[in-house]
């Protein structure tokens, strides 16, 4: 099929190029508006207890989690002065009239000590913004500058989870734009250095841009039917450019190789499309399958990356096996290298040296990699907070003041909704059991106070009088608001939530709020992780088996890939969890890692690592089929592929590393971790450990049970010279 596709691209090169150009313009026009149709996400897991609690709060109480906090500082130094109180109440009334605001709670109307700073200079107004994350943050983008103010009576600063998330999104967009503005010219320059031909570099960039625009257009189309995260567009930029470069490098290099061997131009294009194109297709399927594993998680934030990954692969493969052959048919003479390289090269010599002493070389590299991966043993998953943002960001500054000066964390309330009794009557605050339950909740370690309709409770005792009507629904259902301590919110939040859920309730409860939502999000993520990892490992094993026909080679590839990923996670722990190099990289360590980003990195990095495995193994397999000598096939495969893989890995790593300059910690983690994995995989793994393990396995590398051998997808046969094609090409 690829052979026929190559012939068609040569015979109809003009028509193909015109079609690609028109497609490019159409995708650019449609994909340009993709960002407006994509959505933002919150930390919630559909169907979990916290989400059900949120539904009850919204439907019966007309409220929900307070997601916006206004930090009010009294200019006269006393939040209880009449002057400050009047101005603060006027502020609260102004906020109540704003769009999407459904609930406002201020210190001056509740007298809650949790809303007042210890020194009495500051107090809080908590606000609930209703609507989707996209709607709320768009509205907040207009409201935040309006609410941030300084008057004669008070100073107002905006914070809270929604404002933090909004500013994370804004910072991420800025970081991505800056990174791409750096990465694109840098990649072009590196390609010129690698190819030594500007035309080849420009064609490669064209394939990458085609992939990016095609992915953006596809994401916009998918967004008409389901939610798609805005961050998927960011992945499209870096991955589309990266895979476009990878696939183009291999097709163009194979074309050059065929021409250097004396094959006429049209036959060289067809042969490159058939052989390198087969490898590109296998590689693309591997990357796509790895990212499709994200679909097992019930979060559209992660599912969106699966959509983006599949679209990137499809468009990059089409660009490499349709557009590129047609372009080579027209401009191949501008791509060819003046003279073929005859030296064996550094990587070839390294692989030969490793195979001469396989045990020594393998043990040495394995020791280095295991030491680099060892911090992984101390991995701790945690929840994100304002420290995700760079120092000085307004919402981070506001949150830090609340953390340092307030006795509790009232912006992260744990919502406890009491359910109906077995007799069908609604639980009320008048029952002794409900009052006793509120008192017991206030005694839990990590709970500062419990606000209930019957009063405020601290340390098992009622310290405030009744009168909080907002905690009782019109139908009589009751909710309790647990205010956690600062220490609890900086510690093990899921443990606090579980202590609340484990306490026996009079009629059963639903526990939610932001701490409950993030706890359920993490639990669902970690519960589905083994399934996702199993699908990735199993599917990629099957793909490599179909390509190589070997039982052992896919197994070794899996083990080596996991080793490079262990190095990546060891880096995440050592740098981002433990804080090493935090000063150089410009972030604040939290002592834990938010789990969704490593899951995403696992799927992306595993697919890209297997990408290079496919390229190298396909060339080794081709040489082995030709010579029957494993050692010679490995050496020759590395001689021809390793420099190319190293160049491709360097360019892709540069694309990811550009995100390390951003201000959002998540992007730094992804940029540095993925770049490190790519570089380790393309050097130590592929050029030392892979040849060493193949040298030790010998003929067993190619073994498979006889019934399974017929399932291997064979290489394209050597095409016969096509005289008609040559005349048309000429």
Image (cartoon, rainbow, N blue to C red):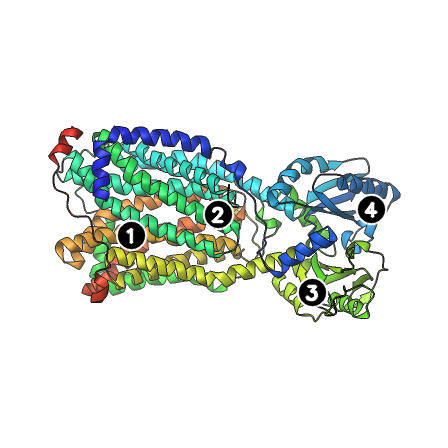
Tell me which numbered mark, 4 or 3, is placed earlier along the sequence: 4
Task: Count the numbered circles shown.
Answer: 4
The image quarter in which residue 455 lies: bottom right
Secondary structure of the residue carrying numbered label 4: loop
Tell me which numbered mark, 2 or 4, is placed earlier along the sequence: 4
The image quarter in which residue 192 lies: top left
Contact between labelled residues 1 and 4, with CB atoms less than 8 Å apart: no
Along the viewing direction, whichever of 443 and 267 lies nearer the viewer: 267
Q: Indicate which label's residue lies in the foreground, 1 or 3.
A: 3
Secondary structure of the residue carrying numbered label 2: helix
Residue 360 numbered mark, or none: none
Q: Residues within 10 Å of mark 3 (few under 14, many from 20)?
A: many
Residue marked by disc 4: 79
Can residue 485 be seen here? The reply is: no
Horizontal arrangement in the rendering, residue 32 relative to residue 280 (left or right): right
Give the vertical position of 364 relative to 390 (above or below): below
Where residue 56 appears, as percent x and y from the top left, is: 69, 56
Residue marked by disc 1: 614
Residue marked by disc 3: 509
Tell me which numbered mark, 2 or 1, is placed earlier along the sequence: 2
Where residue 478 appears, as percent x and y from the top left, is: 76, 60
Give the Cα distance between marks 4 and 1.
66 Å
Give the vertical position of 209 relative to 631 (above or below): above
Residue 304 numbered mark, or none: 2
Give the Cα distance between marks 1 and 3.
52 Å
Give the vertical position of 660 relative to 528 (above or below): above
Residue lying at 68% horizontally and 54% vertically, measured from the top left: 412
Where residue 77 appears, as percent x and y from the top left, is: 82, 44
Q: Indicate which label's residue lies in the foreground, 4 or 3.
A: 3
Contact between labelled residues 3 and 2, with CB atoms less than 8 Å apart: no
Along the viewing direction, whichever of 137 and 26 lies nearer the viewer: 26
């Amino acid at each position: 099929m690829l052979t026929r596709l190559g012939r068609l691209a040569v015979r109809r090169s003009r028509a193909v190029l015109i079609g690609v150009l028109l497609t490019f313009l159409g995708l650019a026009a449609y994909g340009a508006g993709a960002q407006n149709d994509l959505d933002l996400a919150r930390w919630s897991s559909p169907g979990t207890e916290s989400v059900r609690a949120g539904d009850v709060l919204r439907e019966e109480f007309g409220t929900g989690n307070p997601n916006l906090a206004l930090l009010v500082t009294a200019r006269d130094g006393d939040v209880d002065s009449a002057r400050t109180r009047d101005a603060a109440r006027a502020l609260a009334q102004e906020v109540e009239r704003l769009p999407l605001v459904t609930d406002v709670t201020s210190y001056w109307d509740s007298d809650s000590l949790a809303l007042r700073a210890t020194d009495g200079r500051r107090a809080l107004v908590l606000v609930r913004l209703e609507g989707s994350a996209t709607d709320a943050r768009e509205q907040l983008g207009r409201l935040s500058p309006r609410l941030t103010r300084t008057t004669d009576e008070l100073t107002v600063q905006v914070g809270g989870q929604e404002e933090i998330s909004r500013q994370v999104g804004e910072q991420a967009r800025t970081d991505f734009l800056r990174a791409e503005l750096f990465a694109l010219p840098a990649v072009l320059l590196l390609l010129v250095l690698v190819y030594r031909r500007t035309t080849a570099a420009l064609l490669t960039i064209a394939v990458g841009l085609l992939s990016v625009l095609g992915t953006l257009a596809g994401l916009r189309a998918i967004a008409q039917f389901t939610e798609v995260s805005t961050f998927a567009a960011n992945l499209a930029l870096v991955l589309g450019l990266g895979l476009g470069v990878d696939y183009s490098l291999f097709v163009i290099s194979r074309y050059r190789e065929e021409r250097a061997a004396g094959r006429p131009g049209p036959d060289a294009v067809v042969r490159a499309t058939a052989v390198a194109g087969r490898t590109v297709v296998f590689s693309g399927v591997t990357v796509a399958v790895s990212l499709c594993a994200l679909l097992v998680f019930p979060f559209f934030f992660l599912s969106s990356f699966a959509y983006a990954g599949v679209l990137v692969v499809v468009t990059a493969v089409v660009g490499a096996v349709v557009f590129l052959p047609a372009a080579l048919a027209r401009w191949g003479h501008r791509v060819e290298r003046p003279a073929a390289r005859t030296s064996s090269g550094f990587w070839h010599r390294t692989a030969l040296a490793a195979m001469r002493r396989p045990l020594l070389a393998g043990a040495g590299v394995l020791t280095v990699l295991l030491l680099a991966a060892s911090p992984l043993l101390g991995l701790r998953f945690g929840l994100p907070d304002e420290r995700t943002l760079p120092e000085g960001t307004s919402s981070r500054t506001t949150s830090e003041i609340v953390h340092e000066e307030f006795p509790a964390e009232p912006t992260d309330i744990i919502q406890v909704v009491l359910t109906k009794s077995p007799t069908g009557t609604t639980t009320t605050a008048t029952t002794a059991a409900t009052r006793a339950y509120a008192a017991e909740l206030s005694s839990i370690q990590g709970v500062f106070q419990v606000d209930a309709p019957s009063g405020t409770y601290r340390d098992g005792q009622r310290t405030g009088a009744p009168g909080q009507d907002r905690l009782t629904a019109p139908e009589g259902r009751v909710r309790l608001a647990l205010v956690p301590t600062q220490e609890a919110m900086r510690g093990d939040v899921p443990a606090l939530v579980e202590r609340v859920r484990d306490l026996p309730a009079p009629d059963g409860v639903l526990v939610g709020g932001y701490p409950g939502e993030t706890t359920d999000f993490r639990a669902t993520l970690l519960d589905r992780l083994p399934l996702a990892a199993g699908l990735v490992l199993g599917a990629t094993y099957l793909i490599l088996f179909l390509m190589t026909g070997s039982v052992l080679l896919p197994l070794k590839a899996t083990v080596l890939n996991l080793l490079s990923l262990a190095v990546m996670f060891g880096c995440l722990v050592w740098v981002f969890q433990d804080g090493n190099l935090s000063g150089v990289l410009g972030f604040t360590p939290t002592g834990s890692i938010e789990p969704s980003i490593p899951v995403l990195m696992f799927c992306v990095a595993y697919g890209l690592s297997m990408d290079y495995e496919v390229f190298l193994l396909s060339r080794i397999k081709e040489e082995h089929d030709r010579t029957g000598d494993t050692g010679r096939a490995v050496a020759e495969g590395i001689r021809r592929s390793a420099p190319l893989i190293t160049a491709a890995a360097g360019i892709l790593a540069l694309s990811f590393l550009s995100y390390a300059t951003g201000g959002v910690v998540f992007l730094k983690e992804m940029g540095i971790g993925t770049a490190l994995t790519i570089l380790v995989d393309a050097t130590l793994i592929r050029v030392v450990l892979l040849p060493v393990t193949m040298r030790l396995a010998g003929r067993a590398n190619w073994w498979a049970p006889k019934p399974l051998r017929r399932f291997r997808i064979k290489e394209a046969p050597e095409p016969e010279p096509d005289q008609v094609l040559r005349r048309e090409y000429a």
